[in-house]
Image (cartoon, rainbow, N blue to C red):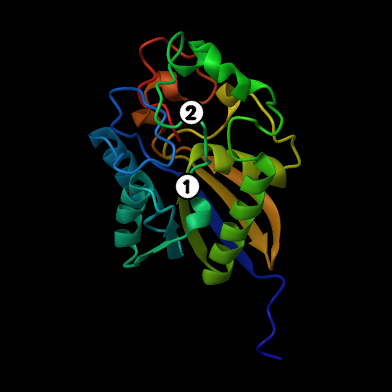
Amino acid sequence: MSSLRDDSELTVVHVMRHGEVHNPEGILYGRLPEYHLSELGRQMADRVAEHLAGRDVTHVVSSPLERAQETATPIAKAHGLDIATDERLIEADNVFQGKTFGVGDGALKRPENWRHLVNPFKPSWGEPYVEQVVRMMGALDAAKDAARGHEAVCVSHQLPIWIVRSFVEKRRLWHDPRKRQCTLASLTSFTYRGDKIVSVGYSEPARDLVPAHLLAGAKPVKGKDKAFGA
């Protein structure tokens, strides 16, 4: 009987968005390599590591992209853990990757790109929301199993984090990107009882470090969205 899983056992999986990225050209970097944390982004990662230092974290796993791995590093170090990598935590694919994507300029002003905007419900410009849900739920379940009875930290990216949270909270998947509650270096925390998610929490341990125009719900400002990307 001792080998049976305890369905009352609590496990917490914190899904963290990476810190600010050095991106002075305002490129939608998506899955492109060689986009690293800025100095401010490293401060954000350190802040979250301090916030989680007293928690029972036994597993740290990251998207393979550099900005996520760099965000995970101080958290893993604080708990004496190695960083696992899970491809399912990667950024969503996007046809505008590598292009500028600012307010009032960039890719959306070019008529040849408008055909990618015909279906916001799928969406037509990138990885389908449903596919993001499937892979992110798989990554969360794997992290839960690795840290069963303890806590795990998964470092990922804004859109897939918001999509999996919307799915769990039974909201529609299509949405206004400006209203995502998933600020840089934020934690979206899924609590499992056994294998079932019983609650979702959200916190911003590094909120005071996040530029005001990048906070959730902030109005875009032309020339101040150079950290765009998730």
Mark 1: secondary structure: strand
Residue 74: quadrant of the picture: bottom left
Q: In the image, which is nearer the foreground, mark 1 or mark 2?
A: 2
Residue 191: x, y in percent?
62, 56
Residue 98: quadrant of the picture: top left
The one of 86 and 204 positioned closer to us in this rendering: 86
The one of 80 and 155 positioned closer to us in this rendering: 155
Mark 2: secondary structure: loop
Residue behind mark 1: 156
Q: Is residue 216 left or right of residue 64?
A: right
Q: Is residue 64 left or right of residue 198?
A: left
Residue 57: x, y in percent?
44, 63
Residue 122: quadrant of the picture: top right
Residue behind mark 2: 96
* Residue type at tag 1: Ser
Looking at this view, name the residue that lies furthest to the front.
112
Please tell me which residue is depicted at 58% across the width and 70% down the height of the picture.
Answer: 145
Image quadrant occupied by the N terminus:
bottom right
* Sequence-first tag of 1 and 2: 2
Residue 221: x, y in percent?
43, 11
